[in-house]
Image: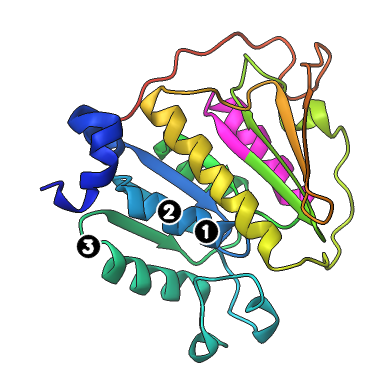
Amino acid sequence: MFERYDRQIKIIGVEGQRRLSRSCVAVVGAGGLGSPAILYLAAVGVGKLIVVDKDVVSVTDLNRQILYSEEDVGKKKAVVVCEKLKKFNSGIDIECIDREFGEEIGREIVKKADIVVDALDNWETRFILNKLCVEYRKPFVHAGIHGWYGQITTIIPGETPCLACIVPKPTPRTTVPVIGVTPGVLGVLEASQVIKYILGVGTLLTGKLLIIDLLYNEFRIIEVKRNPKCPVCGGIQKPQPELSP
């Protein structure tokens, strides 16, 4: 059953693989950050992946969104992702949602997931995701990119600062310039945070913001703290998370 996962079972054991196979991860956004995160989560055998993206593939996506090829230009990302992932790993459950992420659809997605990946490209939608994850006490991994720069943190509502603590106001939507490798690096790091959370191993970027400058090979971690007056997470208590059965 787990033959394809033999190399990682040598590290995490059969029980660790079973934990991955019982987990449900939602990835909001199937672009530059989402592409590597989705592929590696599927590769390690996460039991259920929920992918949300309403966009179509554009030729300008192809410098960084490695899930897509030239023949996919003009197609719905959700359709392409589902087709490719089902061929890539038929042993996992894939649900692809071709809708814009908002409060209505977001509630259903966040409720189902054990952990959520922020692979979005705008702060307005990130703040909606942050609010819902805090409301339902669901952990999520945030990453953002610009040019050669990237940042990533793991948020556990009630324990760590939420996104609104770190960035009090969303910035306006703009077309973000980016070198193709930047979201690749950050997306893989997002997947690694998810895997470690599910397995309960290693150290997460909780209460910490990892800042990466690939142009000058600089990696640094800064501590971030909860804002007790945060309008989103202020006053909530530390959660007792449980994985789906």
Say which amino acid is labelled 1.
Pro
Q: Is residue 134 magenta?
A: yes
Q: Is residue 52 magenta?
A: no
- Secondary structure under tag 2 reads helix
Q: Say whether marks 1 and 2 touch (CB < 8 Å).
A: yes
Query: Could you classify mark 1 by the number of other residues whose Cα lies within 10 Å: few (under 14), some (14-19), or many (20 or more)?
Result: many
- The residue where tag 3 is placed is 90
Residue position marked by numbered label 1 in the rendering: 36
Mark toward the viewer: 3 or 1: 1
Point 27% across, 71% down: residue: 87
**Residue depicted at 75% across the width and 67% down the height:** 179
Question: Separation of disc 1 and disc 2 at Cα?
Answer: 6 Å
Please state which of residues 199 and 93 is positioned toward the viewer in this rendering. Answer: 199
Instruction: Rate crowding at label 3 as few (under 14), some (14 to 19) or many (20 or more) other CA atoms within 10 Å.
Output: few
Residue 33 position within the rendered picture, expressed as x and y whole percent measured from the top left: 61, 57
- Dot placed on the residue nearer the N-terminal end, 3 or 1: 1
